[in-house]
Amino acid sequence: MLFVYAIFYVCRLAFSASKKGMIEQGAYTPAEIGYIGSAMLFAYAIGKIINGFIADRVNVKKYIMLGLFVSALANLLVGFHLPALMLAVVWFVNGFAQSSGAPCCVVALSRWWPRERRGTYYGIWSCSNNLGEVLAYVISAGIVVWVGKCFGPDLAWRSCFWGATAFALVGITAAWLFFGNSPEDEGLPPVPVAEKEATVDTSGGQRIALMSSAVWLVALAGGFFAASRYAIIDWGMFFLQVKKGYTEAGAATIISINSIVGAVSSAFSGIVTDVFFKSRRKGLAIAAGILNIVALSLFMLVPGCHVWLDVTAMVMFGLAVGILLTFLGGLMAVDYVPKCAAGAALGIAGMGSYIGAGLQSVISGYLIERAEDGTATLLGHTFAGGWTLDYLAVFWIAMAVFSVVCSMLAGGRKR
């Protein structure tokens, strides 16, 4: 599951890795690339909840292979330099296909492991996004450089998409050989569940997910968290350069720390709750949320360039992100519903996260203004004594605070 879902990221991030080449070769304008990229995000947000409900009812081994095949085909077509409007349609289809990956994996996790052990394996699986990003950027960059030297720059950006297609075929083969739909399909007994849960069918379980206030509060908490997380991903380097005077290389190094720490934190977050907290996630989620607030406050409110402090803030931020990405991204929502509705719960949680991430991008953009000389600055208020409070900082930290509040309210009875 970890490897197959990592391949989904290769097929998703090929577009990001090839943007520079497409613009330099005149294949597409920056404006065209902008709306093409947004097409995938809209499709992904819509598809996350639709595919979540579908995954509960199908053979997820076959469905994830289908999703990866459609994504491979989309990447193959993009490499032939489609007109911009046609590319937007193809990339929208790719976004919908991409949204099938996580629900299939989470449904399989719920079928293979009981709730008491699910966090351990969910946490390990959640590292797939980090693995996928490494594969996407490192391997794609290598392909682009090699093809550019041997065959010219026009084929270089195209090869990024064709390389993603080749990796998708590897992922499909891995899913066919090793991905298990359920223990029953492998001739094993089903995972035991509580007597009350055993009487619930898929339709009933999905109704429980839709009517669960706890699931929707987790989705809301995840949306606020995603706003603060993607704020650092999208604008963290910009903030360090404009507000604190870092160079581009220095800012990139500081921001990258949280990704490394976050991967380790994700892997161990589920294990910690399974072993030490009897699979109760809420307390650790609240603690991680508070750590997120502290990290963002250190990062954004302390003026001046203090490398040691900014590194510390990113380490704390990475620890918090690893836990919250696992818990609010789906695990807590899945815990609140019967096993047969795991995909529906993940879809609701995932929809909340991507809506939060998208709104953050729009609002953060409005809080950054362009001066007459073309430079970008942060909107804010200067107090007596010369201290300036950036509205961007207020917005990002407020999102983290709201996430903690929603996590606290997400009570309910776990199944």
Image (cartoon, rainbow, N blue to C red):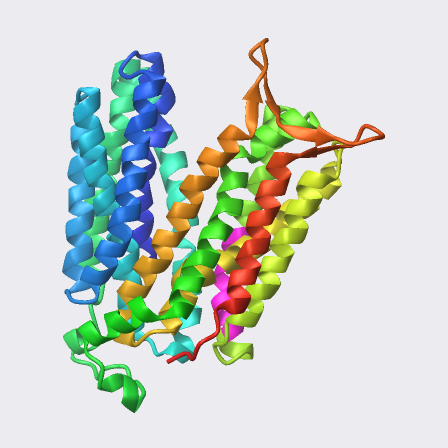
In front: 207, or 113? 207
Above or below 297: residue 63: below
Query: Where residue 333 appears, x then y in whole percent?
Result: 39, 67
Q: Residue furthest bottom?
A: 195
Task: Identify which residue is drawn at 34% across, 19% down.
Answer: 31
* Residue 31 belongs to magenta span: no
Position of the C terminus, as image quadrant, is bottom left
Relative height, residue 378 to residue 195 (above, below): above
Count of labels in the image: 0
Q: Is residue 191 left or right of residue 244?
A: left
Q: Quadrant of residue 251?
A: top right
Residue 36 in view: yes
- Whether residue 264 is visible, yes or no, is no
User: Residue at horizontal 62%, vertical 27%?
Assistant: 378
Q: Which residues are magenta?
A: 261-273
Q: Is residue 123 above or below residue 15?
A: below
396 lies left or right of 188: right
Task: State the image coordinates of residue 291 (x, y, percent, origin top left).
Answer: 64, 57
Q: Quadrant of residue 84?
A: top left
- 329 with respect to 165 (left or right): right
Q: What secondary structure prevails in the magenta region?
A: helix
Q: Residue at x 52, y 34 (%)?
A: 364
- Residue 71 vertical placement versus 160 (above, below): below
Residue 51: x and y in percent read 22, 56
x, y (%) of residue 20? 38, 20
- Residue 263 lies within the magenta run: yes
The foreground one among 385 and 164 is: 385
Q: Quadrant of residue 196?
A: bottom left
Q: Nearer the viewer, residue 148 or 314?
A: 314
User: What is the quadrant of the N terminus in the image?
Assistant: bottom left
